[in-house]
Image: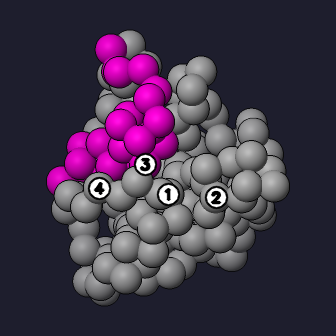
Amino acid sequence: MNNPSNPSSANAPYQLMVMTRPANIGNRTLGHAMIAIGNNRCTGIQKSCCLEAWGLYPDGIRNELLQNNLHLYTRSIVIPISGLEYRKIRKAVEDWRLNGPDWTIAYMDCTDFVQKLLASIGIKVKDYLWPDNFGKSLESHFGSQWGHCRP
């Protein structure tokens, strides 16, 4: 597994970004967590550098790039990853689509989905009920960075 604090990991070809946003009662959302993959060879923030992004919703896994709401996220961490790690994450997403459990609030929701994807490349994180608390925890460990997917 690449270590984001290791300078040699900056040469990794991809960025894994975990983004979270807090609950907003006025908008009737409990918050959200999602994961994105960016091309680490880009400079600055470029829409074309964000390759894929996924989130789990009550109706299943959605392509977050098509949701057009990346600007709503308030927290983000970046972890440089290898091509092998990228393929493992993609496989975990496809496995979930085929055989994954149904969405259940506070049991198998967006935060759990992101945790499973991180676990597929050996990153274990504490379970949190609220996506924003999950994001705070990740920031305290990895630092806050936006990567190439922030619009």
Q: Which residue is mark 2?
A: 23
- Which residues lie in the magenta part? 99-122
- Where does residue 98 sit, x and y in percent of width and height? 38, 13
Q: CA distance from mark 2 to mark 1?
A: 8 Å
Q: Which residue is mark 4?
A: 127
Q: Classify mark 1: helix, strand or loop.
A: helix
Query: Mark 1 or mark 3, which is nearer the start of the sequence?
Result: 3
Residue occupying image coordinates x 32% and y 79% = 141
Report if the CB atoms under discs 3 and 1 are less than 8 Å apart. Answer: yes
Q: CA distance from mark 4 to mark 1?
A: 10 Å
Few, some or many residues within 10 Å of mark 2 (<14, 14–19, 20+): some
Q: Amino acid at mark 4?
A: Asp
Residue occupying image coordinates x 33% and y 14% = 99
Quadrant where the image shows the C terminus? bottom right
Q: Is residue 122 left or right of residue 7?
A: left
Q: Looking at the image, what colour scheme do you see?
A: one colour
Q: Is residue 113 at least partly visible in the picture?
A: no
Q: Classify mark 4: helix, strand or loop.
A: loop
Q: Amino acid at mark 1?
A: Pro
Is the residue 54 above or below the residue 21 in the image? above
Q: Quadrant of residue 79?
A: bottom left
Query: Mark 4 or mark 3, which is nearer the start of the sequence?
Result: 3
Is the residue 71 above or below the residue 92 in the image? below
* Residue 104 colored in magenta in the image: yes
Label placed on residue 131: 1
- Observer-side mark, 2 or 1, equals 2
Few, some or many residues within 10 Å of mark 4 (<14, 14–19, 20+): few
Q: Is residue 66 left or right of residue 54?
A: right
Label placed on residue 111: 3
**Nearest to the observer: residue 130 or residue 47:** 130
- Where does residue 62 sit, x and y in percent of width and height? 61, 31
